[in-house]
Image (cartoon, rainbow, N blue to C red):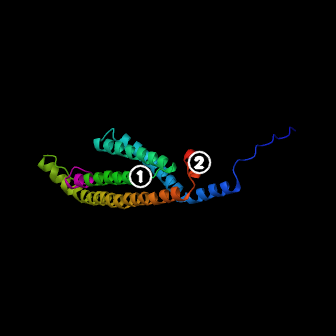
Amino acid sequence: MRPQADQPESPLREEHFRQLAEGVRRSAKVRRAVAVARVSGWTTAVFAFVSLLSGLFSVVGLALGVALAVVAWRELQGARSLARLDAVAPRRLALNQVFFGACLCAYAVWGVWRTLTGDGPGGLAATGDAQVDAMLADVAEPMQAMMRVVMLATYGGLFVGSVLAQGGMAWYYATRARHVREHAARTPEWVVRVQRMAA
């Protein structure tokens, strides 16, 4: 068995290892936010893909798909910047969530309007033939009314859920800026540089 070659002695001393370990510990909340942004970005990318597929039959679906794709791309870019301890990254991620929420709220408002005007799944559109309209009203009116309530509840839930979820995410990202600044202020510059290079 060939003897193992002598390894060169590490230029780092015990104090350096302690500083590195402390830097890793101090950046835990930032690294957690990076993981959240990555999961959020890839999840949004999946929804963007599905929306773009539905966009083959709907202009609104296509617009929503494009918007979600932009959100996903910006979320992943923000995660990459945050991993490099960029102090501006939390603000960009927060604004991205505000944009995301605005897109979903606009879609929900469009869905409510479409349902109330009779063009959506819950609407009862007139055919122009009085006898056919009367027959459809007798048979389909209760089902249409129930469907309309379901659609209004769905779009209303999407609106409220988007405000709460994306608003909460925006707040979460915005509060990470303090952790990035504190980490940079309390950690030796060489440790921060190592972490940025490793990101």
Q: Residue at x 36, y 43 (%)?
A: 65
Residue wearing tag 1: 93
The picture places residue 152, in percent across and down from the top left corner, at 28, 59
Count of numbered tags: 2
Task: Kindly state the secondary structure of the residue where label 2 is placed.
Answer: helix
Please name the residue shown 13% across and 46% down the image: 129
- The Cα atoms of the two marked residues, 1 and 2, are separated by 23 Å
Query: Of residues 68 and 152, which is closer to you in this image?
Result: 68
Three-letter amino acid code at the position of disc 2: Val
Residue at 38% x, 57% y is: 166
Residue 50 appears in the picture as rendered:
no
The crowding category of the residue bearing disc 1, from other C-alpha atoms within 10 Å (few below 14, some 14 to 19, many at least 20), is many
Of 60 and 124, which appears nearest the observer?
Answer: 60
The N terminus - image quarter: top right
- Mark 1 and mark 2 lie on one chain; the one further toward the N terminus is 1
Neighbours of disc 2 within 10 Å: few (<14), some (14-19), many (20+)? few
The stretch drawn in magenta includes residue 116: yes
The residue depicted at 28 percent of the width and 41 percent of the height is: 59
Q: Identify which residue, 191 or 27, lies in the foreground.
A: 191
Mark 2 = which residue? 194
Residue 168 in the image, given as x and y percentages of width and height: 40, 61
Q: Nearer the viewer, mark 1 or mark 2?
A: 2
Label 1 is placed on what type of residue? Leu
- Left or right of 132? Residue 34 is right
The answer to whether 41 appears left or right of 136 in the picture is right
Which residues make up the magenta segment? 111-122
Q: Position of residue 162 (x, y in %)?
A: 35, 57
Q: Is residue 193 magenta?
A: no
In the picture, measured across the screen, residue 128 lies left or right of residue 41, that is left
Give x and y (percent) for residue 25.
59, 59
